[in-house]
């Protein structure tokens, strides 16, 4: 491979990212589980059983030479009913965080990654401004209980995706298609971040708090169109940059946009499947997105970048090229401090279930055995060459 010379600079973190509902299994008090049960979404069941096998997963990460892992804490486990805190769930997550530390992994913890306690969801979730107080109470509680074992916090994962999928496209709970609802949820999530930021900092914590936004790259033969899309992509951060100690970017793909009076704005590269998810990879886009977001003057982390590739013939190249793009941005003065691949193991994918294979490690869902893929070993070799120690 031409990329053989990639070496990671000192202080540049490498690791992986995941979310509770996508790996843990039996997340029974959540809104998502409810829709799985009534047949509206694919069933997650035991999932990868990360809930019980987290030590094995962390040791795979550490064994690969990773520095960091991003996980999420499932609110519906901590507070399965309004105001009832489950002490065994808190102890569970304490063991998780301690195990990560013991294996030398830095811990980035997300508080909201798409799933909600069913009780909160039934009260209107983030579509009701008054409900934000429940989330900040949860954030404050978790920071108090577990803050000593967390290295960085992510308050909200991909607010714009959450709002768009659930309230505009109607493809995820609560399956609404209403631009006004979309807009109010989007705005409420801004306040949710601000409130969670304040709640975590209230106890005097110095632990960095940020968000993870979806950061696609937009190209177009019409420059005004791509500039407009990029501005829309930055909009959420613009509203909260002051309350972000860092910005997390989830970068997966580039969209090529076209415009005609007859058909409006269209995505024209949608029909060129590249990954199994149908996304066209474009590492150059990551460089541009990083440069673009550097305007906020905050440290940047690539909190997700990944490829669904069951054939396992594109993954290493995809990762290496994206890391190289991040390192080019660094050379150009962008303060990008780490790269997290999505994901260490195969995951439950929100609308598609288990068919999409993002993992460096395969999960055999019939035995729950972990089988590192070729890309795991190749990355281990590449990481081994970094000049950090
Ligand atoms: C989400 C993940 C998801 C990944 C791949 C990101 O938008 O944060 O939860 O699995 O994309 O679709």
Image (tube, rainbow, N blue to C red):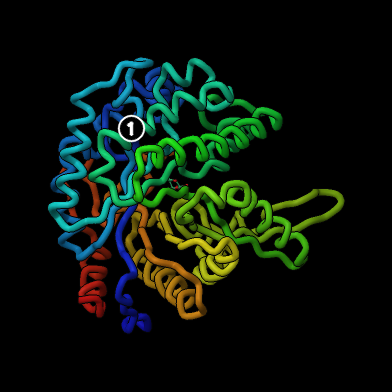
Q: Is residue 81 above or below residue 271?
A: above
Q: Residue at x 50, y 44 (%)?
A: 158
Q: Position of residue 237 (x, y in %)?
A: 58, 50
Q: Nearer the viewer, residue 57 or 116?
A: 116
Helix, strand or loop at mark 1: loop
Pick the quarter of the image with the C terminus: bottom left
Residue at the (49%, 58%) spot, across then down? 251
In the image, taking residue 124 as reference, residue 208 lies left or right, namely left
Residue visible at 35% across and 50% down in the picture: 206
Q: Nearer the viewer, residue 142 or 187?
A: 142
Image height check: is 301 above or below 363? below
Corner quadrant of residue 134: top left
363 left or right of 128 in image: left
Q: Give the position of the N terminus as an image quadrant.
A: bottom left
At 56% across and 31% down in the image, what residue appears? 166
How many numbered badges does the structure rendering display? 1
Across and down, in percent, residue 358 comes to 35, 52
Task: Read off the residue under disc 1.
Answer: 74
Residue 335 drawn at (x, y percent): 46, 69
Q: Is residue 141 visible?
A: yes
| Residue 12 at x, y percent in the picture | 34, 69
* Relative height, residue 271 to residue 156 (above, below): below
**249 displayed left or right of 95:** right
């Amino acid at each position: 491979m031409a990329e053989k010379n990639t070496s990671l600079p000192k202080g540049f973190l490498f690791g992986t990212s995941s979310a509770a509902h996508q790996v843990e299994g039996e997340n029974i008090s959540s809104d998502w589980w409810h829709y799985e049960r009534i047949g509206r979404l694919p069933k997650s069941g035991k999932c990868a059983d990360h809930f019980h096998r987290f030590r094995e997963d962390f040791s795979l990460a550490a064994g690969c030479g990773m520095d960091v892992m991003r996980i999420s804490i499932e609110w519906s486990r901590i507070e399965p009913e309004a105001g009832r805190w489950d002490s065994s769930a808190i102890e569970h997550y304490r063991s998780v965080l301690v195990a990560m530390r013991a294996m030398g992994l830095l811990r980035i913890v997300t508080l909201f990654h798409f799933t909600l306690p069913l009780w909160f969801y039934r009260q209107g979730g983030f579509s009701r401004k008054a409900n934000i107080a429940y989330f900040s109470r949860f954030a404050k509680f978790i920071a108090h209980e577990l803050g000593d074992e967390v290295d960085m916090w992510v308050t909200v994962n991909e607010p714009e995706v959450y709002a768009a999928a659930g309230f505009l496209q109607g493809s995820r709970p609560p399956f609404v298609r209403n631009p006004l609802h979309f807009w109010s949820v989007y705005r409420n999530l801004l306040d949710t971040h601000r409130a969670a930021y304040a709640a975590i900092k209230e106890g005097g914590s110095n632990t960095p708090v940020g968000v993870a936004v979806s950061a696609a790259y937009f190209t177009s033969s019409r420059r005004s169109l791509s500039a407009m899309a990029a501005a829309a992509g930055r909009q959420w951060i613009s509203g909260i940059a002051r309350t972000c100690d860092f910005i997390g970017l989830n970068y997966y793909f580039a969209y090529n946009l076209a415009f005609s009076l007859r058909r409006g704005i269209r995505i024209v590269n949608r029909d060129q499947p590249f990954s199994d998810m149908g996304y066209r990879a474009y590492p150059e886009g990551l460089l541009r997105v990083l440069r673009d977001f550097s305007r906020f003057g905050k440290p940047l982390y690539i909190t997700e970048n990944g490829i669904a590739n069951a054939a396992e013939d594109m993954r290493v190249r995809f990762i290496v090229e994206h890391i190289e793009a991040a390192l080019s941005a660094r050379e150009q003065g962008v303060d990008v401090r780490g790269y997290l691949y999505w994901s260490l193991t195969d995951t439950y994918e929100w609308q598609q279930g288990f068919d999409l294979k993002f993992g460096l490690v395969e999960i055999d869902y019939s035995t729950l055995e972990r089988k590192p893929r070729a890309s795991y070993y190749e990355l281990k070799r590449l990481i081994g060459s970094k000049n950090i120690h």
